[in-house]
């Protein structure tokens, strides 16, 4: 290697972005300088905007990221939108490498009749709303509704169900957005139906998350005993399944045994059911559902519709069937997977295309929306290993605009970027406001308000 100094830009500031930065900053040879660019004035991606407010322990990973942000070779540039404020070429001209780690911000659709009726929302919107994400601040959820269906059996569906069902008093001390707490305090919700297309053995949730449902005060979690009578394929799958799946089944049996205890709110876990149509004149009134059976196709257990149709009256529906990445102008994109095509984190110029020298990716936009926060550590390491291997084995060209500072560029474009120090001012303000109101944090949910507060601090 000729020059042991390298500059890397990371687009995004969630776990994959921070783990990538930490891996780059771990050693002094090469001496890597990291600039992290984030669309919002606030860092941490889904740790701030996705993790449920009653899961504060999960958010403690922020302490590790904060330490990384204090590294002398690290800079944070919040309120800088990739693709709008700065484009791909402008980054490639300034850095030896660019890492795209901006996650998957869109949600998948059911593609069934009635999906555009009023009262149908994505879990992404609801999660963003209760977490005070500026993009979702002004969404309206009619919590005067009594019966709500959530389509999907993953951890996001469980998060949404827990937030909807539990006593808002339990959330009052958390960092839940104030507007969401107020709305939940007025909520009339009596019944929530979690609807999974396959059986309990195939559920996407994890034991820690489903176990919490057993302990929700004033909520009965109920399920049909017949859903626990497994078909032969599922029995076989369970016999070889991971410990997590075995635990899921044990917890579901406990849930079933606990049953209806006469509590005011009911959370129904419904397996082997798919929505086929959403009905209503302008608002959702009911869902047409079909009962499924499990079939084995190409070694995979799939849901196959039977001719048993049923209707469920509901006032609101959330689809929680997974996130999907967003194509950003100028970047290669795999439409089918919703990811950036890559080989071990190094970008390809298209699906099955050629390797690109300077560009890398990490996190959900690299591998798809799966895994917990910690999964991004391994994922980021794979990307950084590939990047370092390339630096060691090939001739890396010096960026054309070595002298041109990113700060000058952003100032010229009149972009009010937010440094990590600026963010810490906002962080302090939010924590202090929270303490005054008996909460762990009172989030600011509007970008302009954040910027004004930073300026006046
Ligand atoms: P997910 O885990 O992929 O679950 C998606 C669910 O939607 C699955 O039950 C899936 O069923 C179902 N689904 C997909 N397409 C469907 C369709 N057309 N009709 C009906 N159902 C459909 O996604 P997620 O819940 O959004 O979570 C994303 C990732 O974040 C996961 O890795 C999750 O563990 C993680 N996360 C973790 C936590 C935590 O650790 N506390 C919290 C939230 C999220 P099939 O299995 O049949 O496809």
Image (cartoon, helix red, strand yellow):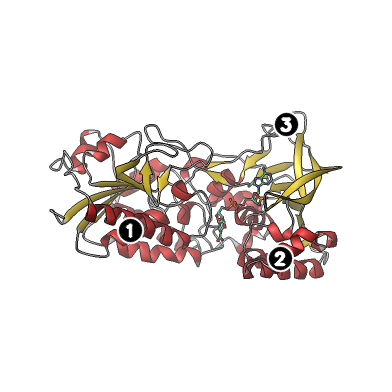
- Residue 229, percent from left and from top: 83, 63
With 18 as the anchor, is 358 left or right in this view?
left
Residue at figure coordinates x 77%, y 48% from the top left: 273
Q: What residue sits right under mark 3 in the picture?
A: 113
Q: CA distance from mark 1 to mark 2?
A: 36 Å
Could you say which is closer to the camera, residue 370 or residue 1? Answer: 1
Residue sitting nearer the eye, 15 or 265: 15
* Quadrant hosting residue 218: bottom right
Residue 100 at least partly seen: no
- Do residues under tags 2 and 3 come within 8 Å of each other at their CB atoms? no
Specify which label sits upstream in the sequence, 1 or 2.
Answer: 2
Left or right: 184 as drawn, with respect to 33: right
Kindly report which numbered mark, 2 or 3, lies closer to the viewer in this rendering.
Answer: 2
Please tell me in which quadrant of the rendered image residue 412 appears: top left
Q: Which residue is mark 1?
A: 385
**Mark 3 or mark 1, earlier in chain:** 3
Residue that mark 2 sits on:
238
Q: Quadrant of the N terminus?
A: bottom left
Q: Nearer the viewer, mark 3 or mark 1?
A: 1
Other-residue count near label 3 (Cα within 10 Å), few / some / many at <14 / 14–19 / ≥20:
few
């Amino acid at each position: 290697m000729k020059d042991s100094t390298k500059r890397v830009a990371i687009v995004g500031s969630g776990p994959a972005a921070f783990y990538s930065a930490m891996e780059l900053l771990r050693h002094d040879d090469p001496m890597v300088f990291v600039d992290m660019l984030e669309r919002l004035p606030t860092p941490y991606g889904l740790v701030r905007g996705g993790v449920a407010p009653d899961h504060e322990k999960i958010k403690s990973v922020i302490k590790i990221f904060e330490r990384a942000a204090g590294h002398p070779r690290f800079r944070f540039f919040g309120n800088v939108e990739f693709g709008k404020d700065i484009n791909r070429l402008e980054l490639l001209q300034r850095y030896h490498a660019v890492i795209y780690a901006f996650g998957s911000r869109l949600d998948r659709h059911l593609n069934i009749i009635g999906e555009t009726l009023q009262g149908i929302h994505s879990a992404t919107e609801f999660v963003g709303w209760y977490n005070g994400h500026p993009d979702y601040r002004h969404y309206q959820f009619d919590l005067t509704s009594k019966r709500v269906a959530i389509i999907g059996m993953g951890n996001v569906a469980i998060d949404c169900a827990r937030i909807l069902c539990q006593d808002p008093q339990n959330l009052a001390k958390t960092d839940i957005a104030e507007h969401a707490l107020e709305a939940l305090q007025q909520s009339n919700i009596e019944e929530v139906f979690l609807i999974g297309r396959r059986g309990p053995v195939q559920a996407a949730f994890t034991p820690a998350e489903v176990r919490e449902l057993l302990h929700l005060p004033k909520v009965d979690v109920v399920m049909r005993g017949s859903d626990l009578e497994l078909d032969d394929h599922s029995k076989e799958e369970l016999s070889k399944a991971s410990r997590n799946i075995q635990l899921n089944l044990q917890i579901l049996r406990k849930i079933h045994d606990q049953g209806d205890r006469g509590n005011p709110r009911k959370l129904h876990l419904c397996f082997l059911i798919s929505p086929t149509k959403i009905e209503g004149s302008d608002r959702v009134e009911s869902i047409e559902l079909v009962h499924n059976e499990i079939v084995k196709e190409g070694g995979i257990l799939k849901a196959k519709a039977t001719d048993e149709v049923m209707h469920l009256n509901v006032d609101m529906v959330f689809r929680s069937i997974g996130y999907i990445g967003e194509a950003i102008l100028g970047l290669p994109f795999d439409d089918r997977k919703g990811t950036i095509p890559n080989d071990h984190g190094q970008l390809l110029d298209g699906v099955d295309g050629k390797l690109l020298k300077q560009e890398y990716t990490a996190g959900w936009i690299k591998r798809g929306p799966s895994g917990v926060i910690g999964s991004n550590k391994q994922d980021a390491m794979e990307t950084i290993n590939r990047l370092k291997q390339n630096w060691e084995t090939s001739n890396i060209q010096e960026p054309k605009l070595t002298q041109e500072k990113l700060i000058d560029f952003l100032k010229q474009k009149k972009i009010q970027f937010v440094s990590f120090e600026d963010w810490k001012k906002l962080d302090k303000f939010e924590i202090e406001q929270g303490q005054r109101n008996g909460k762990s944090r009172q989030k600011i949910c509007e970008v302009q308000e954040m910027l004004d507060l930073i300026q006046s601090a």
